[in-house]
Amino acid sequence: MRIYLIALIILLSLGLFTTQTVVASESIVVIVNKDNQQPLAQQDIKNIYIDVVYQWKSGNRITVYNLPVDSDTREVFSQKLFGESAQRMAAEESNRKITNTIKNPSKTKRARLVAKLVAKNPDAIGYIPASMLDQTSNVRVILQID
């Protein structure tokens, strides 16, 4: 348990003391499988990513995909949607894992794989750079972040 606390302190320190600039980049799109027609507002998406909502209205568990912490796309997603750095958001999720209060941990995958996995799984949600939509079928955009 002590090692976990030390790891948490290190992660929190990185999140609190690392200054990161949001990279001006292309739009980011939050996607779900085309078969998922549940309407989602921006607040619903935030609640999914902070582990407040972890099931679709159908009762199925949501499969949440995140990009790696060092991804510019994840940094922009975290900053624009939550006003927090990607490292800080990852530290908060890590804390919920350590304290055993997490209900639905996210899965971290590269953007190309997120697009493919969401396209195959009607219960998945993820985000990718908008330019990847051209290569991705069977997904529905529920939010665009500019």
Image (cartoon, grey):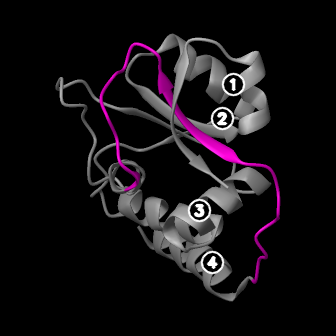
Hey, which quadrant is residue 13 in on the image? bottom right
Instruction: State the separation of the CA atoms marked 2 and 1.
Output: 6 Å
Q: Is residue 22 magenta?
A: yes
**Foreground label between 4 and 3:** 3
Q: Which residue is mark 1?
A: 113
Residue identifier under label 2: 109
The answer to whether the residue labelled 3 contacts the one labelled 1, judged by CB atoms less than 8 Å apart, is no
Mark 2 and mark 1 in contact? Answer it, CB < 8 Å.
yes
Which residues are drawn in magenta? 19-42
In percent of width and height, residue 18 lies at 73, 82
Q: CA distance from mark 1 to mark 4?
A: 26 Å
Query: Could you tell me the amino acid type at mark 4?
Result: Gly
CA gap, disc 2 to disc 3? 16 Å
Residue, disc 4: 15
Residue type (three-letter) at the residue carrying disc 3: Ser
Tag in front: 1 or 4 = 1
Residue at (82, 64) in percent of width and height:
24
